């Protein structure tokens, strides 16, 4: 894929003896929705941390829209179009949800004045938080915090959205709402990379699935095929991966 | 996909009454030298200095998470700037302005050194940096060396007028300091600063240049402390290096901000008034003064962990300096593919 929007080239990272990325290559197209599964400790969150800039790789490159961003800081990558959510939501406790999205609209998307206000409101509305515009981050429920993570990322006008286990800890109807939201965002032309244990949520959303284990990709391709892959099944200890997350 | 523009209000529900009360209070404070004896206004100078340095420390620690124990570096730099400029013929009152500029100018290179340290190391590092500033300044013989210097250029001013001018100067510096904090937090950078206060990692992910935001706070804070140092020397008419570079200043800032409420613009003002009153009431109590101060600190820290103003704010939602964005009306509804709730 010559015109990949996000390209990871030979990413490697070790913490002492623990390998979290072992020469990882991954490409995401401009309108793609990619799901990533893998057991705990497979290096999923480290992959996002390196992509987003929170973690510096030992070797390899992160290329966003043809530009090498490996050495750039987190806020520069956000401004370049990389939106992300954290596995454990990080709301701004003392800021209202509107101030939160307004911050992302001004600092992340570079919007000003009315444009910033409407972008901030739009992001909240899309995530079903418009009625909580004046509520502080520390007064939100878990689902609302997860939505705020997505809203904040959306307000920075991302071209690629990295979602880190946003469905974890939610009830079934809540997961269904989240799937709706991610599908709508993707339909607007935002590329999505979604790490998730709740496999059925992924299957409803993504058009490509990759499986990560021991810091490398063991499978990558059509979601149904990846889930049928014997190596992937082995990694899930003989379980049917599509049953995962129901627990 | 773009919706309309929501109506947003920046003022709290208590804004109008508090701004009227604030304006009246300010007028009374300005007229005070004509209304009361000189000892009242001269003791208020120290209250204004406390408000300035505490507001600056609140900006630094309460919003930037930069727990500095070395702001006395800039208090000292400010004081010595006024002394040195007075030797060169610059009127001391104007020298106070230059003191702020000098402190900020020195804070810029200092920040590159200090920002290499994080958390506890930053605290200890800033203290060491303040000591370095003191050691360098006492090497300069023309500034009096270890025994300090007196301020020139004030002898020809009548003592009563001088007291009044110094009072107005201190009041002015305090008002400008608080107003600067308010203006900073209300502006675009204010959102970034508040976000940095709440969660640095998430602030970065939202596109905030966290290091730059912290540097802005560090420079503003240094400028305020520099001006405070200038006021101190104009008030005392002399400077003594061990006193002006004393870590006691940092202890006072921390005490005031923790008592008053860290992360609230009102906190340092409330805390400074409490600290000032304790100082006045317990002036003759000797070492019992420090014992009582410690007890107050422990009581507030355990009973009211958000400080006096934090408690008021939580209970009544009161805000003298509203910096929030309140959405008062959503834009007209239009078809939207969003999730319903």
Image: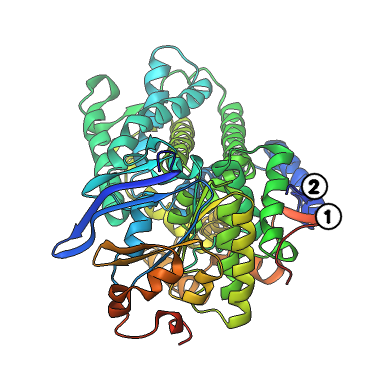
Quadrant for residue A69, please give it: top left
The front one of A131 and B119 is A131
Q: Secondary structure at mark 2?
A: loop
Q: Answer yes or no: is residue B283 visible.
A: no
> How far is disc 2 from disc 1 in space, using C-alphas?
9 Å
> Left or right of A215: which side holds A2?
right
- Hey, which residue is sitting farthest left in the picture? A17
Q: In the rendered image of this protein, does residue A11 appear above or below residue A45?
A: above
Q: Residue at x 30, y 76 (%)?
A: A230
The front one of B131 and B218 is B218
Q: Residue at x 44, y 35 (%)?
A: B219
Disc 1 target residue: B334
Q: Secondary structure at mark 1?
A: loop
x%, y% of residue A34?
A: 46, 59
x%, y% of residue A119?
A: 68, 47
The front one of B65 and B318 is B65
- Hey, which residue is sitting farthest right in the picture? B332
Disc 2 target residue: B4
Q: Nearer the viewer, mark 2 or mark 1?
A: 1
x%, y% of residue B118?
A: 30, 51
Say if mark 2 contacts mark 1, CB within 8 Å.
Answer: yes
Q: Answer yes or no: is residue B286 visible.
A: yes
Label 1 neighbour load within 10 Å: few <14, some 14-19, many 20+: few
x%, y% of residue B241?
A: 29, 36
Q: In the rendered image of this protein, does residue A234 appear above or below residue A60?
A: below
Quadrant for residue A135, please give it: bottom right
């Amino acid at each position: 894929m010559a015109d990949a929007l996000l390209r990871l080239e030979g990413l490697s990272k070790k913490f002492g003896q623990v390998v979290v990325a072992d020469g990882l290559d991954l490409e995401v197209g401009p309108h793609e929705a990619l799901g990533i599964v893998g057991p705990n400790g497979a290096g999923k969150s480290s992959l996002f941390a390196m992509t987003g800039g929170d973690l510096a790789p030992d070797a390899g490159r992160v290329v966003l829209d043809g530009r090498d961003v490996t050495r750039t800081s987190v806020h520069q990558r956000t401004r370049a179009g990389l939106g992300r959510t954290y596995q454990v939501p990080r709301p701004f406790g003392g800021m209202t949800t509107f101030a939160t999205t307004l911050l992302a609209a001004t600092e992340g998307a570079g919007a000003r004045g009315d444009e910033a206000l409407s972008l901030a409101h739009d992001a909240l509305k899309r995530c079903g938080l418009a009625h909580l515009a004046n509520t502080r981050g520390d007064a939100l429920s878990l689902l609302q915090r997860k939505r705020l993570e997505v809203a904040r990322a959306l307000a920075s006008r991302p071209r690629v959205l990295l979602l880190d286990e946003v469905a974890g800890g939610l009830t079934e109807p809540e997961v269904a709402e989240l799937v709706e939201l991610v599908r709508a965002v993707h339909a607007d032309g935002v590329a999505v990379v979604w790490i998730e244990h709740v496999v059925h949520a992924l299957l409803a959303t993504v058009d490509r699935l990759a499986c990560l284990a021991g810091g490398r990709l063991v499978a990558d391709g059509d979601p149904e095929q990846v889930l049928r892959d014997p190596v992937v099944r082995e990694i899930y200890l003989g379980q049917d991966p599509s049953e995962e997350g129901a627990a | 996909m773009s919706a309309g523009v929501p109506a947003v209000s920046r003022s709290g529900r208590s804004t109008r009454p508090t701004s009227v009360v604030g304006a009246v209070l300010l007028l009374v404070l300005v007229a005070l030298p004509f209304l009361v004896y000189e000892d009242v206004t001269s003791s208020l100078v120290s209250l204004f200095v406390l408000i300035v340095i505490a507001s600056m420390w609140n900006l630094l620690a309460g919003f930037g998470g930069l727990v500095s124990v070395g702001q006395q570096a800039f208090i000292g730099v400010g004081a010595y700037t006024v002394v040195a400029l007075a030797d060169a013929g610059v009127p001391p009152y104007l020298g106070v302005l230059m003191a702020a500029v000098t402190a900020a100018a020195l804070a810029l290179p200092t920040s590159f050194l200090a920002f290499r340290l994080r958390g506890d190391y930053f605290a200890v590092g800033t203290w060491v940096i303040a000591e370095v500033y003191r050691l360098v300044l006492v090497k300069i013989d023309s500034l009096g060396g270890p025994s300090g210097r007196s301020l020139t250029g004030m002898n020809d001013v009548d003592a009563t007028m001088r007291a009044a001018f110094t009072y107005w100067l201190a009041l002015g510096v305090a008002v400008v300091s608080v107003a600067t904090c308010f203006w900073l937090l209300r502006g675009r950078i204010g959102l970034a600063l508040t976000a940095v206060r709440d969660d640095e990692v998430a602030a970065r992910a939202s596109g905030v240049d966290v290091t730059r935001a912290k540097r802005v706070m560090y420079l503003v804070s240094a400028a305020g402390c520099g001006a405070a140092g200038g006021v101190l020397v104009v008030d005392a008419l002399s400077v003594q290096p061990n006193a002006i570079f004393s870590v006691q200043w940092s202890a006072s800032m921390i005490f005031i901000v923790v008592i008053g409420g860290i992360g609230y613009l009102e906190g340092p003002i409330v805390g400074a008034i409490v600290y000032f009153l304790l100082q006045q009431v317990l002036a003759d109590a000797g070492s019992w003064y420090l014992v009582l101060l410690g007890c107050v600190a422990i009581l507030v820290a355990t009973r009211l962990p958000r400080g006096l103003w934090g408690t008021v704010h939580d209970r009544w939602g009161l805000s003298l300096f509203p910096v929030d964005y309140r959405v008062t009306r959503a834009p007209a509804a239009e078809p939207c593919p969003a999730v319903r709730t």
